[in-house]
Image (cartoon, rainbow, N blue to C red):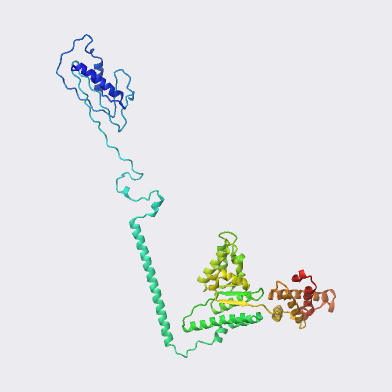
Amino acid sequence: LDHPVMKLVVVSSALASVVAFAPRSIPFSRASKSRLHSHNAGPPPFGTGNPPPFPTPAYPPAPAPAPSYAQPASPSYGGMPPPFGAPANGSAPAWGQPAQPAAPAPAAWGQPAQPAQTQPAQMQPAQPAQAAAGNPNPFGTKSLEFTGGSDPNMKNYKKLSQALNEADTERRKAKEEAEARERAAEIRREQRLKKIAHMENMPDNTEAGSVDEFMFKEGVQDQLDQLDNDLVGLIPVKQRVKEIAALLVLDKMRRKLGFETAVPSLHMSFTGAPGTGKTTVAVRMGQILAKMGYSRRGHVVLATRDDLVGQYVGHTAPKTKEMIKKAMGGVLLVDEAYYLYNAANDRDYGQESIEILLNVMENNQDDLVVAVAGYKDRMDRFFSYIPGMMSRIGNHIDFPNYSADELVKIAGVMARQLEYDIDQNAFPVFKEYIEKRMELPYFSNARTVRNAMDRARMNSAIRTFERFAIQGENGGVCSIDDLKSIKAQDFQVLVDDIVNADVAKRIFA
């Protein structure tokens, strides 16, 4: 082993073993390739008949040049196939992989082999990743600015400057609102002080005007007189209407002197049987409120469930608001209001309409009067289901049924309005008809009287036509009294229809 040739054989065998198990190819320089080629083509080693060379001074081999990554050299294995795992085409190692040590340079003939001198590969620093579009410098100041990001939760965050500006805006608005409230309170205090000073300086004998003056000047008395003429009986109803009118008149007189006034609750509830004059009283109340200045227009809008409640989700609110818009400035009369609430169906849409009405009754009582009407027993049950409606209505008026004598007077009022004259002998016959009709179901007070008057007019027309047109009485010429008269025989037809009709058909007589 001390001989240089034997050392070279041992080093070559060790190098071949290392190359066989290396994962990458060993880069060789051109100088290394030429020396290895010359060594392979040199004289045969010791033991083939040549005398061993004498020892000569060992000169250090030339250092191997650094591998060039721009043009890697292809390794050569002395005519042998490349070892397992080494590339055959001599490609350079991939970028970032460590370079394998270079093969040792062959010593000159007779010179001891020197171990290969390896140099560490020169690693270049990794280049930084490319920045996002529009920002070539990822480490600059622009990359640190907040851009929002793609996370939807990023919208919950904001810049500190923006948050401070918003806080200043909210603080300024709160301060302005507080100042506005203080100014309004100060104005109210000043007005109250002026009113107190006016009341203290006003003489005790100052006249505010007479009640009759306000009643006639505003036209309230005319409406009450018309109500007395149109409605027969209903003494409690008329008394209640007069009480409401008196409250409104005195409230206006107090306002004239400077007293504190407040609009009373004018929402009403009319309970009673059909045909008792609920709609007529509502119309008169609307006109009285308009005369007194508590209503802008004084008109009455009649509404039922079909006008307020929709048939599908989202349909009820627009219909209810449309009817309220039509009634603004007047009276909204909801007839048979108990049909708005259906206790047997929790998903009924009428509850939504009731909630809208309650909100309007509370917030718009200065510009809208809501009146609900219906049978008393059903209205009481309705108020038990909707206590908020009961508490918002301050005027409950019950309309009693008419008596037979009052219904006869109502017939005379209707005939006078239609310019007919009823004979004195016809009134007892009409009263007999009313008494018999009141015993049958579906009696509707004044509505039944109106239907009876229509039939009496038709009977009078048939009688007059037969006399003058068919029989030719008086040459076919009839007088004014003949055209205006309603006789007892015209009502007797109605009585005979009830008496002679079958029991099952008497209600249609």
Please give left or right for residue 259 compared with residue 467 in the image.
Answer: left
Name the foreground residue: 241 vs 339: 339
Quadrant containing the N terminus is top left
Please give left or right for residue 235 compared with residue 460 in the image.
Answer: left
Instruction: Note whether 110 is above or below 194 in the view shown.
Output: above
Q: Position of residue 401 (x, y in %)?
A: 66, 77
Please give left or right for residue 179 compared with residue 99 in the image.
Answer: right
Residue at position x 40%, y 49% in the image: 151
Residue positioned most to the top: 49
Q: Position of residue 161 (x, y in %)?
A: 33, 57
Residue at position x 55%, y 79% in the image: 292
Can I make out residue 34 in this image? no
Q: Position of residue 189 (x, y in %)?
A: 40, 78
Q: Quadrant of residue 289?
A: bottom right
Name the foreground residue: 182 vs 484: 182
Can I make out residue 362 in this image? yes
Please give left or right for residue 247 compared with residue 68 in the image.
Answer: right
Q: Position of residue 175 (x, y in %)?
A: 36, 68
Residue positioned most to the bottom: 205
Quadrant containing the C terminus is bottom right
